[in-house]
Image (cartoon, rainbow, N blue to C red):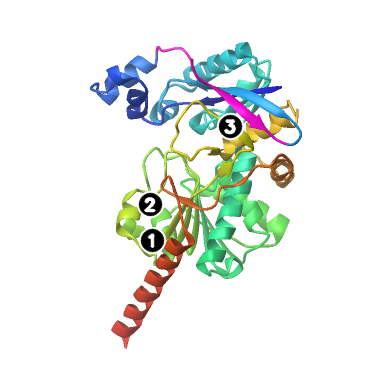
């Protein structure tokens, strides 16, 4: 039996309050103050993981800090809290631990954490990239968009996931824009892409303008609040939202019936998996970052697989192949925590056509 663990954390103080009803009437500030002093928590025992080659069990371990705290508290303090959660994973018997959400972003993206643990560590970012691109390709196909000729935007392109998505997309498309706050870093990534693929990409720090112009957007920023609003998107746009917390406002689903927003990195897990925790997904599915940890455990690759901010195409291809070997696969197309039917997608396409027709009539 292979053993793994996965470190997660409350995205907001309200997530913490949902777990502990006694805290539901407390303010966010009060709860965040308390969380700073709470030790790691064993959330659940994960059972039923089984592929044709191996079986596994694991644990969810919580590091009680919100996304905002992860970004705003002193880095050394946050890393110490995450390492304590990793030590709990060690004691539970895990041989590899995955870093979820903002625990994979803080500091040097897992390198320091791995140095302070006696078990393997992975951020899960390699499989996140693989599934985000697979989902984007499928969304473009069902929407009838030629990916090669589409205006594609990677939002948050200076992060490890964004940079890797850009590097891989540059091998198959003609028009690529990279957006982030740090334009100097964007220029370096653009230079690397030009050298390796021959594609000259556009870079910009003006994210709003880039969003409005894009046919397809892969959103992978570390923003703690939504940054894509209903008025930002052109009719027919596709957004693959990989970020947690979400980059796309829920208002988009309420107000725009002519765009397609999909969740990046949701996969089906082999076996009769029981996570012992409801994180809003259908039974038997998980985030790709969680899945990477499980895949490596089933494969008995107890090594620091995805760490730091430089992902390689080889890493991404390797984890995609191992995922297929063990029976992990993309869980269809999902939007705001629910599965999308092809009837719904066709309705979006019809709405896009209606908007285009109305625009043509107004011009003529």
Q: Which residues are magenta?
A: 37-51
Mark closer to the chain start, 1 or 3? 1
- CB under 8 Å between discs 1 and 3: no
Where is residue 229 drawn, in percent x and y?
Answer: 34, 53
Task: Evaluate if marks 2 and 1 touch, with contact meaning CB atoms under 8 Å apart.
Answer: yes
Which residue is painted at 67% across and 58% down in the image?
Answer: 194
- Label 2 neighbour load within 10 Å: few <14, some 14-19, many 20+: many
Residue 336 x %, y %:
41, 47
Q: Main secondary structure of the magenta part?
A: strand
Residue at 45%, 33% in the rendered image: 279
Q: Is residue 328 visible?
A: yes
- Check the image and report above or below for 191 versus 358: above
In this rendered view, identify the residue nearer to me: 323 or 34.
323
Question: What is the number of the mark on residue 233?
Answer: 1
Residue wearing tag 2:
228
Q: Residue at x 50, y 25 (%)?
A: 276
Mark 3 lies on residue: 273
């Amino acid at each position: 039996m292979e053993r793994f663990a996965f470190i997660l954390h409350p995205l907001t103080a309200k997530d913490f309050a949902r777990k502990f009803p006694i805290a539901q009437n407390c303010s966010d500030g009060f709860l965040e103050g308390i969380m700073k002093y709470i030790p790691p928590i064993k959330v659940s025992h994960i059972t039923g993981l089984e592929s044709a080659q191996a079986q596994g069990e694991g644990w969810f371990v919580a590091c009680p800090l919100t996304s905002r705290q992860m970004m705003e508290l002193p880095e050394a303090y946050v890393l110490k809290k995450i390492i304590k959660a990793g030590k709990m994973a060690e004691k539970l018997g895990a041989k590899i631990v995955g870093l979820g959400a903002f625990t994979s972003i803080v500091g040097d993206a897992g390198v320091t954490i791995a140095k302070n643990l006696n078990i393997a560590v992975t951020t899960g970012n390699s499989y996140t990239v693989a599934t985000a691109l697979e989902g984007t390709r499928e969304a473009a196909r069902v929407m009838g968009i030629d990916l090669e000729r589409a205006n594609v935007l990677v939002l948050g392109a200076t992060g490890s996931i964004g940079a890797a998505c850009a590097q891989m997309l540059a091998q198959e498309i003609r028009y690529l824009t990279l957006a982030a706050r740090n334009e100097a870093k964007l220029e370096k990534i653009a230079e690397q892409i030009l050298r390796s693929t021959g594609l000259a990409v556009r870079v910009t720090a003006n994210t709003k303008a880039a969003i409005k112009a894009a046919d397809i957007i892969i959103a992978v920023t570390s923003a703690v609040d939504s940054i894509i609003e209903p008025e930002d998107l052109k009719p027919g746009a596709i957004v693959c939202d990989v970020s947690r917390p979400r980059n796309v406002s829920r208002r988009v689903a309420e107000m725009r019936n002519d765009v397609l927003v999909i969740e990046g990195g949701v996969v089906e897990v082999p076996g009769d998996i029981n996570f012992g925790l409801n994180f809003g997904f259908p039974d038997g599915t998980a985030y790709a970052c969680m899945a990477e940890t499980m895949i490596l455990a089933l494969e008995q690759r107890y090594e620091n697989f995805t760490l730091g901010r430089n992902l390689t195409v080889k890493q991404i291809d390797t984890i995609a192949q191992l995922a297929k070997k063990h029976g992990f696969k993309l869980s269809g197309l999902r939007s705001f925590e629910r599965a999308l039917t092809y009837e719904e997608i066709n309705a979006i396409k019809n709405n896009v056509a209606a908007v285009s027709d109305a625009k043509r009539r107004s011009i003529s």
